[in-house]
Amino acid sequence: MSIIKELFLWVLFLVLIVAGLFTYYARTPIPLDHIPFVFELKHGTSLKSAAHQIRQAGGLNNDWLFVLLGRGLGKAKQIKPGNYQLEHEISPLQLLDLISKGQVEQSSLTIIEGHTFNQFRSILNNEPTLRHDSKDLTDAEILKRIGASELAAEGLFFPDTYNYIVGSSDLALLKRAYQLMQHHLQENWKKRDANLPFETPYQALILASIVEKETGQPADRPLIASVFINRLRKPMRLQTDPTVIYGLGSKFDGNLRKRDLLRDNPYNTYTRDGLTPTPIALPGLASIQAVLHPAPGKALYFVARGDGSSQFSNSLIEHNNAVNTYQLKQSNPKK
């Protein structure tokens, strides 16, 4: 009997040690690779799959212990889909509670294609669900805080809808938008067409921003990109109004005059050769892809038809005829 009793005590002792270690694991904060830590769980994600995804993203050291904890607590079938963002380290127990309840107070913010960085900042500053850590920072200070190496902020943030936890820092959202733009730009740069007149991805980003501002109909993007690329190859000046408007800044009153086209500044593509010094807006993925895969053709001109689409011409004579046709049509809509 004494041997059985001693064996029982040893087993009990081992159980208590294991329980203690498991409790310690469950309540010890998880070291995160980065803050904020963002991850997404899609519909139908199992506990095992969720643990694997979080570990791959740098949020768990050991996914099988996390799965064992979840199954032991009966939460294996309670995983809720959604976008999650951690602003600080939490324990496996807290993380399990978070993804099983899905009760994260979230909001979202949409960056619109074609908006300028100043417009984007205004939207951020007026969003009540964000913490405004960037409000009093200059553009250069923002770039430094998010780890960007560029000198100008324009065009560097990807237009998309971003989900975040209420109370998150706007700098965290800016960093996500910057990193996503870098990802899309670099990935598409690798697959670009041959013999394009760009030396760097940043130059492609500049032209993509111009295409974004010039496009009325999505189907016209590759054609508009082709016109500008054909001009760069000639070389011909781009002569595009949105760059002039951007250069005017707050001086632009909604009416672009001939004197504005003649007034020289770094963004006036009527007086300056080549690309502008920086992007002029936040381009979307379609515009980036358009300048890296332009439509074939020799068109050098285009004019708005008045319905959002454009008429493309290979020669100045054709273009002047198109201008007369569509400007006359717009000036005399009843005829």
Image (cartoon, rainbow, N blue to C red):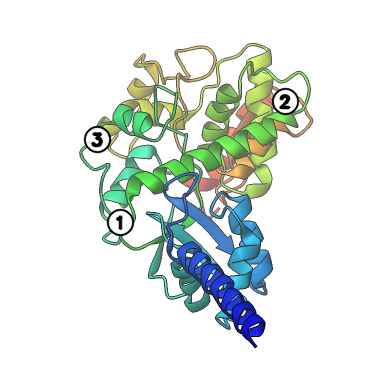
Mark earlier in primary sequence (2, 1): 1
Pointer 2: what residue?
314
Residue located 40% across and 31% down the image: 153
- Residue 239 in percent (x, y) is at 51, 22
Residue located 61% across and 81% down the image: 8
Mark 1 residue crowding within 10 angstroms, few (<14) / some (14–19) / many (20+): many
| Closer to us: 76 or 236 | 76
Q: What quarter of the picture does the N terminus occupy? A: bottom right
Q: Amino acid at mark 2?
A: Asn
Give the label, 2 or 3, closer to the camera.
Answer: 3
Distance (Cα) linking label 1 and label 3: 16 Å
Residue 246: quadrant of the picture: top left
- Residue 60 in percent (x, y) is at 56, 55
Pointer 3: what residue?
137
CB atoms at circles 2 and 3 under 8 Å apart? no
**Residue 168, above or below 280:** below
Q: Is residue 193 left or right of residue 276?
A: right
Mark 2 residue crowding within 10 angstroms, few (<14) / some (14–19) / many (20+): some
Pointer 1: what residue?
130
Mark earlier in primary sequence (1, 3): 1
Q: Is residue 283 visible?
A: no
**Which residue reaches farthest left?**
136
Mark earlier in primary sequence (2, 3): 3
| Closer to us: 253 or 30 | 30
